[in-house]
Image (cartoon, helix red, strand yellow):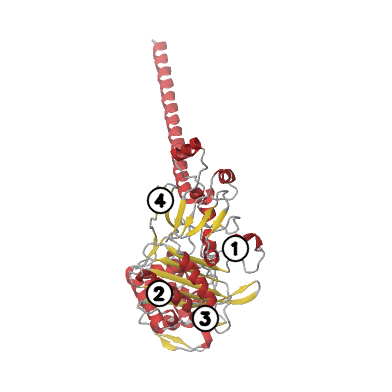
Amino acid sequence: MRWTIRAAFLEYRLEMKMKRKRRRIKLVILFLGSLFLLLGIYGIGSISTYGTRWFSYRRNPRLPIQKAEVLPGDILDRNGAVLATCDAQGNRIYAQDAEMRKAVVHVVGDASGKVSNAVESFQTGYLYGFERPFWELASDLLSGKQGKGDTVQLTIDGTLSREIVRTFSSLPLSAGHAGAAVVMNWQTGEVLAEVSLPGFDPLLASQVQETDAGQPFWNRATQSLYPPGSIFKTVTAAAALESLENPEQQIYMCEEGVDVDGFVIHDFGNARHGQMTMQEAYLVSCNQIFAHIALAVGDTKLRACAERFGFNDNFLFRDMVVSNSTYPVKNGRSRYEVAASGFGQSAIAASPLHLCLIASAVADHGIMMEPILLHTVSSENGAVRTRLSPRVYRKALDVTEADTLKQYMLEVVRSGTGRKAACEGLTIGGKTGTADSTLRGSPISYGWFVGFCAEEACPYSVCVLVEDIDSGEGGGSTAAPIAARIFSYLRDMKSSGR
């Protein structure tokens, strides 16, 4: 009897041990399964987010093999003009118009890959047939025909890009200067122009020195970060509207200069504006008053507002690589650093494309669309792989604040510092800016204009940058006239039905 009870007890203990083991095994399997699931989700997310960037990396071992076997696809502008094609031997041929070749080279790229992250490299997956379905590859193999990559049609307008370069060259305060211009549709995010100066002819890329001080291979529109100067007053004003009580009724004083921690802040041309509201200060671009406003808002809230506009974000746009704009994040910034941030100096930096996005958000009730370069991708036989797909990037402002800033910007062009950006037949809003910095140890000033056409029938925003402007000049005299020419082109383009 005793042995029977003992055997039963041992059997019970053994069964409990097995249950515990099975439970532990299930937990381990569940844990490992969860890890694999998370790894899969992360992998899918990484591929969708970074896939194009990884794939277009120049050291991808698949690229040279594919490029030796497949003719590259064509690159067209939004109107069907050929920006890049190839001959029977696969040699890259660019637009016949030399001016257009130079104007779009930083978007399209060059055969030698000297322009980083241009369409020639960033859209390699389409241009060299990596996205072609199996049946197309099999058909080429059976027929012995050399495969050809997909045709990539861009949202870029080649003629507009050429006209922007001509305008830079024809106006005395920008002729011979480096700079950039971005034009986009604020409703859809389509980029119509992304011009960087100086440019170069992609057919003569081998003759251009990479050590050229003008950095002709560098895309200033997307890769260079500059102090935005008074353009940033739009963000400072937005922060005030969000966080201060009745900021539009507050009266500020602009004197000969305001002393902040031993640093004296002056206005352009040492102007003394006297008593003004925030809108009046925005209209004449008063640094002193926006320094006061920044201090009233405080660094934390000003940075939070800047980050809603995209500063300090990692720009992972589908169609292009854009350098990340920055607002200082260190704790304990001095009062002077915060004050200088109010008018876009200190350590704030942004690209022309990002500043164009900010103007777009004001125009579109606070909505900032993702910038888009791909209009359509189609096979050699005309089968469409992908079409333009607008996507909201972020909500930068609520509607009330955006509409208030919109009125500020409209008044700047009607009667403020941006009058030279006005265009007959269109309602233009904008903001001028002049920023100071150093380049290779020497002082340098930048002239800015950002703005938009308010009509929904002509929904375009513009950013213009002129580098190393002459002493005594500002964004209103250097960049705004270029913007006016761009708006005129856009007006005529719409009226002709293009």
Q: Compare residues 332 and 323 and report the one nearer the observer.
A: 323
* Marks 1 and 4 close (CB-CB < 8 Å): no
Q: CA distance from mark 2 to mark 1?
A: 40 Å
Label 1 secondary element: loop
4 vs 3, front mark: 4
1 vs 3, front mark: 1
Residue 490 can be seen, yes or no: yes
Label 3 secondary element: loop
Q: CA distance from mark 2 to mark 3?
A: 25 Å
Please name the amino acid that badge 1 sits on.
Answer: Phe
Label 4 secondary element: strand
Is residue 250 toward the left or the right of residue 115 in the image?
A: left
Q: CA distance from mark 2 to mark 4?
A: 42 Å
Q: Give residue 386's mark.
A: 4
Q: Give residue 217's mark.
A: 1
The residue that disc 2 covers is 240
First in sequence: mark 4 vs mark 3: 4
Above/below status of 235 relative to 133: below
Q: Give residue 207's mark.
A: none
2 vs 3, front mark: 3
First in sequence: mark 2 vs mark 1: 1
* Marks 2 and 4 close (CB-CB < 8 Å): no
Above/below status of 389 relative to 263: above
Label 2 secondary element: helix
x and y percentages locating residue 442 in the rendered image: 65, 76
x and y percentages locating residue 351 in the rendered image: 51, 67
First in sequence: mark 2 vs mark 3: 2
x and y percentages locating residue 92 in the rendered image: 56, 54
Q: CA distance from mark 1 to mark 4?
A: 29 Å
The residue that disc 3 covers is 474
2 vs 4, front mark: 4
